[in-house]
């Protein structure tokens, strides 16, 4: 199972903080596409160019592999002050 987390304004737009997914392996971008297919209202927010991803708490690229047991987080850019 893959645990998918959504943070900040993305969580608000999707209406959930967490989603669990079974029987998936692929890249971060393939996961985004899969989630958008499963939940069409999620497609535009997840595919936005500024949405970042982390796999197992490490920043990830579009081609980073995702497999069973991973935790994937999607979030908008983070700023601080």
Image (cartoon, grey):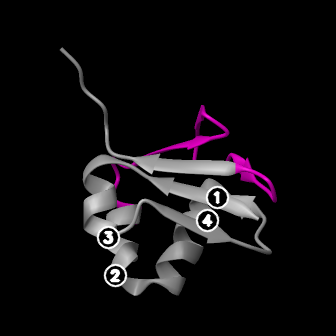
Q: Could you tell me how far apart the alpha carbons at marks 4 and 2 are, in whole angstroms? A: 15 Å
Give the quarter of the image for residue 31: bottom right
Residue visible at 26% across and 66% down in the picture:
13
Q: Which residue is mark 3?
A: 15
Q: Which residue is mark 4?
A: 31
Magenta-drawn segment: 47-70
Check if residue 69 falls in the magenta segment.
yes
Secondary-structure class at tag 4:
helix
Q: Which residue is mark 1?
A: 3
| Label of residue 68 in the image | none
Give the quarter of the image for residue 11: bottom left
- Mark 4 or mark 2: which comes first in sequence? 4
Q: Nearer the viewer, mark 1 or mark 2?
A: 1
Q: Could you tell me how far apart the alpha carbons at marks 1 and 2 are, in whole angstroms? A: 19 Å
- Mark 1 or mark 2: which comes first in sequence? 1
Q: Residues within 10 Å of mark 1 (few under 14, many from 20)?
A: some
Instruction: Please give left or right for residue 43 compared with residue 24 in the image.
Output: left
Expressed as whole percent of the image width and height from the top left, the position of residue 39 reads 45, 83
Number of dots carrying numbers: 4
Instruction: Please give left or right for residue 52 compared with residue 34 in the image.
Output: left
């Amino acid at each position: 199972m893959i645990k998918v987390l959504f943070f900040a304004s993305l969580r608000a737009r999707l209406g959930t903080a967490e989603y669990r997914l079974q029987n998936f392996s692929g890249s971060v971008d393939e996961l985004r596409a899969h989630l958008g297919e499963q939940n069409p209202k999620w497609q535009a927010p997840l595919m936005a160019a500024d949405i970042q991803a982390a796999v197992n708490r490490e920043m990830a690229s579009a081609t980073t592999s995702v497999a069973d047991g991973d935790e994937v987080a999607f979030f908008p850019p983070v700023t601080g002050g």
